[in-house]
Amino acid sequence: MKHLQYNDIDYRTLFDGFRNPNSGAVVLFSGEVRDNNKGREVTHLEYEAYEPMADKMIAEILAEAKLRFKLNHVACVHRLGKVEISGCAVVVITGAGHRKEAYDANRFIIDRVKNEVPIWKHEFFTDGTSEWGQNCDCVTNGHEQHHEHRHEKA
Amino acid sequence: MTVQVVCFAGLRKYFGSKTGVKVEVGSSYQSILEALAKINPEAGEVLKSCRIAVNEQFVAPDSPLKEVDTVFLIPPSSGG
């Protein structure tokens, strides 16, 4: 799998691969694990995915972003398994001629990965309980079926 | 016919990792969700926000059920 891994994400090395004479802007987003969520103290997270489908979907999102935003380089890697506090859960790097494309593409990619790709976060709390996370607001907004629409709120 | 349903994440507490459901030949994928809701009514709400994938592609719930052995029940994503 190219876009999912069980070991630490070495985003410094990934970033070095983005040096390109045509790229005036390289944006790196790292989604990191907070020690709290909705007022509760978090000890760590564990990620699970429907792996072959998630890997394929991330590849498709990156291909679409590369074309749409005219990127020179693009990468996205998401962690699976246990991630400690301050660990990197997901990284998105976009390299383009100018900053607007690099920023816009980066946001486009992380939003779609969070909302559409079959990856799930299991949060563990200091009180010994745990909970599966939910990024999208479909249930609370009364939506039924499908997540094919964009989720602006997540 | 019996379809095997693979469950992920929070769905496992309702159905385990994999469960078989009986559905009528010629019905839609939606019938799988309805059958699951009957097996465990507590999952009724979350099932409304689940998608079904076959061969690593999402299928429309109202599309006719094809001859598949296994479907993947995808709860709302929570990556990142």
Image (cartoon, rainbow, N blue to C red):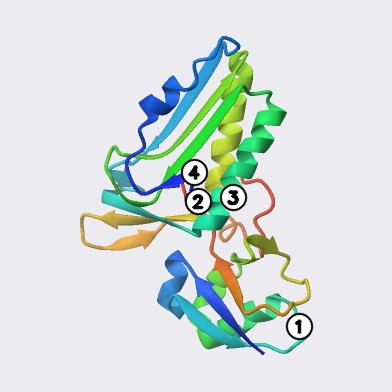
**Callout 4: helix, strand or loop?**
loop
Indicate the secondary structure of the residue bearing disc 1. loop
Identify the residue at image location x=48%, y=78%: B18
Left or right for A5, reference B30: left
Cα distance in 3D space between marks 1 and 4:
36 Å
Labels 2 and 4 positioned on one and the same chain? yes
Give the labeled residue for mark 3. A56
Please state the horizontal and vertical placement of residue A53, each as a whole percent of the image: 57, 56
Q: Residue type at mark 4? A: His
Q: For the residues tagged 3 and 2, is the chain the same? A: yes
Position of the C terminus of chain B by quadrant: top left
Q: Which residue is mark 2?
A: A135
Toward which corner of the image does residue B27 lie, by quadrant?
bottom right
What residue appears at the point 71 percent right and 29 percent down from the top-left corner?
Answer: A68
Label 2 to label 4: alpha-carbon separation: 20 Å
Asked if labels 4 and 3 touch by Cβ distance under 8 angstroms, the answer is no
Q: Look at mark 1 in the image and give the residue it sits on.
A: B27
Determine which residue is flagged by label 4: A3
Left or right of A63 on screen, residue A103 = left
Dot 2 amino acid type: Asn
Q: Nearer the viewer, mark 1 or mark 4?
A: 4
- Answer left or right for B47 relative to B9: right
Classify 10 Å Cα crowding around label 3: few (below 14), some (14-19), many (20 and above): some
